[in-house]
Amino acid sequence: MTSTNAPVPAPAPSGTGCLECIAHDGWWWHLRRCVTCGMVGCCDSSPAQHASRHARETGHAVAASFEPGEEWWWDYAEGHSAKRGPLEPPRWRPEDQASPGPEGRVPENWRDLLNEP
């Protein structure tokens, strides 16, 4: 038996949107994907900040952007960018999916409701 040192890809994403927002009739601005378990959560500019909450509550500190074309990773514990690695597909939410989303739940004044960085 031979072994390889190839990195193991992070699990597939939990869905195409923030599961917590979907479950609680919420909405999001941008999405992040936990590279430890695949949980997709909303960004810190979103009202509920589910991705960073997930990082604090689980200790899964590193997330990748789940926005189409964005390649960056973030370490919530350290407060800076993180080293990228392989991810199971899909890499991003569907390009035709509305942002903010989910479609039909975003209030007209959504920009006024975003959290400031």
Image (cartoon, helix red, strand yellow):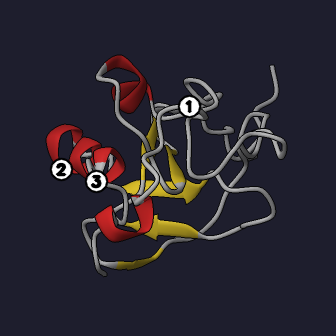
- In-image side of 59 versus 82 (left or right): left
Residue 80, position as x, y percentages in the image: 39, 81
Location of mark 3 (residue): 47
Q: Earlier in the sequence, mark 1 or mark 3?
A: 3
In depth, the one of 108 and 29 nearer the eye is: 108
Q: Nearer the viewer, residue 77 or 29?
A: 29
Question: Residue at label 2?
Answer: 56
Count every numbered label the image shows and give the total: 3
Mark 3, Cα crowd under 10 Å, few <14 / some 14-19 / many 20+, is: some
Query: Of helix, strand and loop, which one carries label 1?
Result: loop
10 relative position to 55: left or right:
right
Look at the numbered disc 3 and give the secondary structure of its residue. Answer: loop
Q: Position of residue 50 (x, y in %)?
A: 30, 44
Residue 66's x, y, as percent?
Answer: 63, 51
Image location (x, y in percent) of residue 19: 43, 25
Q: Closer to us: mark 2 or mark 3?
A: 3
Residue under label 1: 104
Residue 114's mark? Answer: none
Q: Quadrant of the N terminus?
A: top right
Q: Give, as a three-letter code, the residue at label 3.
A: Pro
Residues at marks 2 and 3, CA–CA distance in whole angstroms: 17 Å
Of 35 and 102, nearer the camera is 102
Q: Is residue 97 left or right of residue 32?
A: right
C-alpha gap between disc 1 and disc 2? 30 Å
Query: Nearer the N terminus, badge 1 or badge 2?
Result: 2
Q: Is residue 49 above or below residue 101?
A: below
